Amino acid sequence: MKVMKISIFLSMLIFVGCSVGGVSDNDIGLRKSSLFSEDSAIKAYDYNLKAAGESTLIDRAFENAPPMIPHNLDDMLPITKENNSCTSCHLPDIAEAVNATPMPKSHFYSFRENVDLKGAMDESRFNCVACHATQVNAQPLVGNKFMPNFREADSNKKSNLLDVLNEGVN
Ligand code: HEC
Ligand code: HEC
């Protein structure tokens, strides 16, 4: 008897679950296609941006946000212990010669030990793509009204995290 009651209850639940407001599974997610198939959901986005040296910098999303990578990463990934091509252009000693933005002071400072590493990169910065991301030519699925508030005229193009980190802290 008890088992029967539970199974009636369950089938009612399933019935209710399937028909709430007549919403089809195509309308549940942002992707607007069936949740039961990946076929139509995955579009071929184009990661094929311009090469390093030919791309245009992207404004920072907010003050001291990690800048987006504006160029393609052809032959640069994966970053391995033996091979980190990012540093071959972005280390401050080299960057100017190749017209790349030099890595900032914060990447040569250990926040764990609270010491300036005197020009040596902090190992926690090694995997650049953990924080810096490339871009695809995809349109956002929902609009975004976020407006960053940059305190200095050039802070949409430059970072100064290490200089301002302790602002307001005594
Ligand atoms: C061959 C040199 C080269 C290599 C290798 C390279 N970059 Fe760049 N990068 C540049 C140049 C040059 C720019 C400036 C934009 C341009 O001219 O294309 C740039 C711009 C950037 C920017 C934007 C900086 C800003 O001020 O907005 C980021 C972030 C970046 N690169 C990250 C990376 C990462 C991460 C890697 C490794 C996966 C990498 N780069 C590998 C040369 C390089
Ligand atoms: C843990 C996250 C993280 C990692 C890993 C990381 N970055 Fe950054 N990066 C940031 C943030 C956050 C900023 C902006 C704030 C600042 O100055 O630290 C930044 C800023 C930069 C800038 C802009 C400098 C400027 O003066 O505007 C460059 C170039 C850069 N990073 C390159 C790299 C490269 C190359 C690597 C890998 C060798 C790397 N980053 C690894 C988080 C990271």
Image: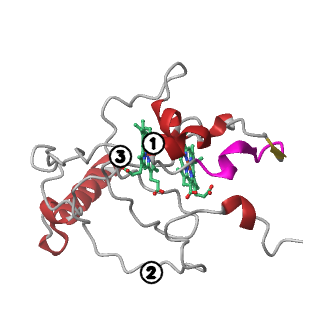
Tell me where the magenta segment starts and ends, as one range. Answer: 103-113
Q: Closer to the camera, 40 or 139?
A: 139
Measuring from the top left, give residue 68's x and y in whole percent: 42, 55
Q: Secondary structure at mark 3?
A: loop
Q: Secondary structure at mark 2?
A: loop
Is residue 49 left or right of 95 when viewed as pictured?
left
Query: Going by the picture, which residue comes out furthest to the left?
Result: 40
Mark 1 close to ligand 1, CB under 8 Å: yes
Residue 53: assigned label: 3
Looking at the picture, which amino acid does disc 2 mark? Met
Measuring from the top left, give residue 25's x and y in whole percent: 15, 59
Query: Going by the picture, which residue comes out furthest to the top?
Result: 82
Mark 3 close to ligand 1, CB under 8 Å: yes
Residue 98: assigned label: 1
Asked if the magenta segment contains residue 106, the reply would be yes
Q: Which of the 4 image quadrants contains residue 17?
A: bottom left
Looking at the image, tell me whether mark 1 or mark 2 is earlier in sequence order. Answer: 1
> Would you name the residue on which mark 2 appears?
147
